[in-house]
Amino acid sequence: MQKKIKINNKKLKTSILIKKNFISKFVKNIAKKNEKVFCIVDSKIRINLNINNQKNIIVISLRCGEKIKTFDGYKNLAEKIILKDVNRKSAVIAIGGGTLGDLVGFVASTTLRGLDFYLIPTTLLSQVDSSIGGKNGINTIFGKNLLGTFYQPKEVLIDISILKSLPKKEIRSGYAEIIKHALIKDYKFFCWLEENSNKLLNLNKSILEQAIYQSIIIKLYYVIKDEREFLSNNNSRAMLNFGHTIGHAIEKYYDYQKFNHGEAISIGMITEAKISNHLGLLSSKELEKIIIHFKKCRLKIYDEVLNDRRLIKILTKDKKNFHNNINFSLIDKIGSSIFYKKLEKKQVYKILKNIK
Ligand SMILES: NC(=O)c1ccc[n+]([C@@H]2O[C@H](COP(=O)([O-])OP(=O)(O)OC[C@H]3O[C@@H](n4cnc5c(N)ncnc54)[C@H](O)[C@@H]3O)[C@@H](O)[C@H]2O)c1
Ligand SMILES: [Zn+2]
């Protein structure tokens, strides 16, 4: 399968190409169009870019993970690029997972007030989620992604052949974002995933590409309607935060050590589904259906941190939450989500204490 999705409206211009075994060619094509190209590559990726004779491509390899999304990570990379005589005719290509993409996007958007930026996501999570929509950023001691910009890549290349080396744990992490997209917007897709999750988790090519494509379409639905998250209705980009209010707080609680992003938001989605059930929104039958699917796919559903008051403290520091209220994007059915529910800090603590 080869597919190209082009978005070319007044506010948003970008394109997404889904094509196998194409990374090296893609990089060379960009090098032909730019004076200098900075390829920032995750050091775990096994790939031969075949660029020996191309002097205008500079490769910078980074050891990735949440720890690079910091002030230091930003400074080191920006300074490396500046030292190598970046100019306005330079382009930046990020070849890596979501952490690399988020950092490089932020560096590209701020260096010389914005360089042309291309993304080649190499984890399932980054192919279905973080490479789409133009959000980037780094973390601060106060929480995740608190510094960043909206900056659309010129083009995104999704090449599933790069996923072969990805550990199973990371495949499941990406699957968590796929299932999130189904839960907030597409009941039929959820049923299709119930049927096909085994094949998908075993990297069946055709199933994988279909799931990635459908995930991207759902994410784009919100990005096109509400790129900067201004809307306050069910079309708001905030709907994509389902599972993330709790998920981000869990990541922060454990200082990004115990769980990867997908694991934390899996616990987040189940917990927020339980909150929704507790509020009388999501039926017990549908909640059970979701839990069964998560268990079948060995996605995490619980952690003891949910009973710790310190989690509530972290939740109130989230950039979406003010005045002791905590905002949740919840689902009221499989395939249907509702805009922020404001819950009081005390109420959240009480609910969390009562759910197992
Ligand atoms: N910008 C957005 O809209 C958005 C959306 C969702 C998530 N995110 C962010 O994305 C990040 C998570 O991304 P991630 O899950 O890709 O994490 P990651 O970048 O840390 O990658 C996970 C691990 O896989 C390794 N890796 C990457 N590609 C590989 C490959 N092909 N083979 C073998 N190993 C490989 C990495 O080195 C790392 O150890 C989080 O920081 C999250 O906040 C951003
Ligand atoms: Zn996420």
Image: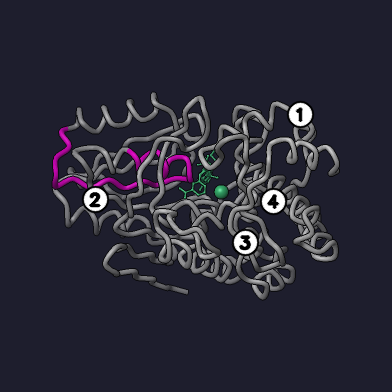
Query: Does the stretch in magenta take in 322?
Result: no
Alpha carbon distance from label 1 to label 3:
27 Å
Q: Which is in the foreground here, disc 3 or disc 2?
A: 3
Q: CA distance from mark 4 to mark 2?
A: 35 Å
In contact (CB < 8 Å): disc 3 and disc 4: no
Q: Secondary structure at mark 4?
A: helix
Q: Which residue is mark 1?
A: 308
Q: Residues within 10 Å of mark 1 (few under 14, many from 20)?
A: few
Magenta highlight range: 85-106
Tag 1 and tag 2, C-beta contact below 8 Å: no
Q: Quick one: 336 or 186, which is closer to the camera?
A: 336
Going by the numbered disc 2, the residue's amino acid type is Asp
Q: Residue, x 77% and y 54% (percent of image)?
A: 279
Badge 1 or badge 3: first in the primary sequence: 1
Amino acid at pointer 1: Asp
In the rendered structure, the answer to whether residue 52 lies left or right of residue 138 reads: left
In this orientation, does residue 38 appear?
A: yes
- The disc, 1 or 4, on the residue closer to the chain's N-terminal end is 4
Q: Which residue is mark 3?
A: 338
The quadrant of the rendering that contains the C terminus is top right
Q: Which numbered disc, 3 or 2, marks the residue that appears first in the sequence?
A: 2
| Numbered circle sitting on residue 116 | 2
Decide: is 256 above or below 228.
above
The percent position of residue 40, horizontal first and vertical second, equals: 34, 40
Q: Amino acid at mark 4?
A: Met
